[in-house]
Amino acid sequence: MKICVCAKQVPDTNEVRIDPVKGTLIREGVPSILNPDDANALEAALQLKDEYKDTTISVISMGPPQATYMLRECLAMGADEAVLLSDRAFGGADTCATSTTIAAGIKMLGDVDIIFGGRQAIDGDTAQVGPQVAMRLGIPVVTYVQKIVEYTGDKIKVQRQLEDGYEVIEVKLPCFLTCVKELNEPRYMSVGAIVDAYKKDIKIYNHDDVKLDPKDCGLNASPTQVFRSFTPPVKGKGEMLQGSNKDMAKQLVVKLKEKHLI
Amino acid sequence: MSVVVIEKDCRGCTKCVKSCPFDAITMENKKAVIGIACTSCGTCIEVCPFDAIVKDEVEKEEHDLSLYHDIWVFAEQRQGQLQDVALELLGEGKKLADARGCQLCAVVCGLNLTNIVDELFAHGAQKVYYIEDERLNQYTTDGYSIAIGDAIEQYKPEIVLLGATHIGRDLGPCLAVNCNTGLTADCTKLEINEETKGIMQTRPAFGGNLMATIVCPNHRPQMSTVRPGVMEKAERVDGAKGELIRVQIKLKDEDIRTKVLEVIKTVQKKVSLTDAKVIVSGGMGLGNAEGFKLLERLAKAFGGTVAASRAAVDAGWIDHAYQVGQTGTTVKPSIYFACGISGAIQHVAGMQNSDLIIAINTNENAPIFDIADIGMTGDLYKIIPDILEEMGM
């Protein structure tokens, strides 16, 4: 079986702070990480490989050259090969253009049985690239996969998460599955695999390598554009109640009564 | 629009490098160079002291946009139940239709949905595009994206709005590819640009640390998914009527490549955080799942419901249906109690528009106090019983 995993290197948005005076993002010291949902996607692929030994896993990403660090991490977790789509021509892409590029990259891998991706990346939170890659490859997609129920060679049965439950969905391969964190617990890199990861080559493809015209990728092929961006207005600090627990409880109830909330 | 550096004006100060949220700028020969990770967010333009970074308009081929009219909202139904988010979309769609001077329409798919069609008229839809087909009773990505894509091609709406639910966020991206247009995810604010008459879509990015306003100038329809719980629901006018259009579509059985074997509800009681007037939310500070029992008591005293931060959900203390925040539900109740919640930006993004935020936390420096209207430093296991006692409960 051949599995492809789509991964993205993202800034750890949990570590981002806003400068309270200037109202700008403080980026210094914010680490770049493998997008959390993508780690679940890779783990799902690795679990299939654990069971079916003749499986190869290719990880594909689009991003700047430094994304190779993240790809090495994927190799150290157990992926067999890694491909980075990196080219100035890919820059400024919205989800639509990104999906065209990634789909073109996946086509270069040959026939793939299953493609796993994270549900969404924590820097953009759009959840659009996975389904759009599937559309461009002409294969079915199941999003929000929270459990793999059964894999039977030509079909896979999965649970798709809903707000108040889940659906059980059966889909024929090849297909694209986007994964949520409930799917599994990503494994750690092993020491031996880290060493091996540095011996492997990471393929870097530009637009010519994936047979794309520059007018069909990046900003040129993006229907949506950022008009402006801004840091959200910070709400002013409210009142801190003082005194013992009992005093604070009393003050709170008085305030709520004044506001006719009780 | 792309962001470019005017090389002769760049002095190599590196301010843009530090400001870039996406780490897309590097220095080469003491000049800033914008790399592939650039999203054209424009943060660097503002910080550059030398005006050496500008937005460059890209020439795009012109499509005939004048063929597209009206605003469509996707009326999501599950098991024949119209979802609340559809009413929110009609509420917001009405404002946009007034600003644009066009009609507000709804599109609905399934079987035996005349009740829903009437509800859509009662909530302000002037036209309802009804795709009646047994194969569309249950949502499937392929079925819906082909059927609605077909309807869009036939009737050419200018704007299409979908709820950013687990279904809308699945359908939207596929529909956008089928219609060869752009899609903006999870919008929290929509407005019509008076000059261009295009839609301005504002959404949180970067875990809620950055807001971006997105436009789709040269493709139609302009499509957005909208966060549930953010927009005001349309008012119901009894007996309001509109025009019903039954849409004929080309859909083959084999087009639907996924099979939904069953739909399971795991949350017995329907959690409607978006409608709750009072929410009592718990985080890591609870220490264990039992803590939610105390929160339940406080919620009951106010006739409200409990909710949780992502940390509490991740710890397995409560179902993810109760999660408030960037990846959970967005809420705006009259009172939001944040109990033992530190106030990570992702959580705050989902509750900061609550009318009154009351925070209880042992750490007086917790960021939640920066946005709380009323803060109390102390042990929630002591303070909450005291509040209940004061209320005579």
Image (cartoon, rainbow, N blue to C red):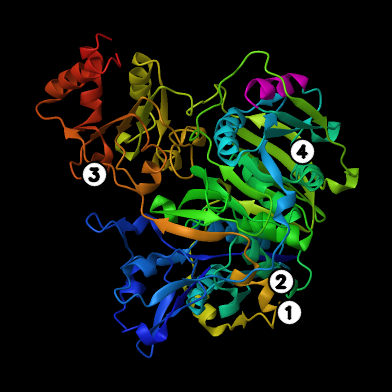
The spot of residue B110 in percent (x, y) is 79, 30
Residue A104 marker = 2
Q: CA distance from mark 4 to mark 2?
A: 30 Å
Q: CA distance from mark 1 to mark 2?
A: 7 Å
Q: Is mark 1 in CB contact (under 8 Å) with mark 2?
A: yes
**Does residue A142 sit above or below B300 in this rendering?**
below
Q: Residues within 10 Å of mark 1 (few under 14, many from 20)?
A: some
Q: Which residue is denoted by mark 4 in the rendering?
A: B260
Q: Which residue is denoted by mark 3 in the rendering?
A: B366
| Element type at mark 1 | loop
Q: CA distance from mark 3 to mark 2?
A: 46 Å
**Does residue B73 sit above or below B174 in this rendering?**
above
| Element type at mark 2 | helix
Q: Is mark 4 in CB contact (under 8 Å) with mark 2?
A: no
The spot of residue A13 in percent (x, y) is 40, 57
Q: Which residue is denoted by mark 1 in the rendering?
A: A211
Taking the spot 66% from the left edge, 78% from the top edge, the residue there is A214
Q: Amino acid at mark 3?
A: Ala
Q: Are marks 4 and 3 on the same chain?
A: yes
Q: Residues within 10 Å of mark 2 (few under 14, many from 20)?
A: many
The verdict on residue B115 being magenta is yes
Magenta range is B114-124
Q: Chain of mark 2?
A: A
Nearest the viewer among A189 and B105 is B105
Q: Is residue B242 visible?
A: yes
Q: Amino acid at mark 1?
A: Lys
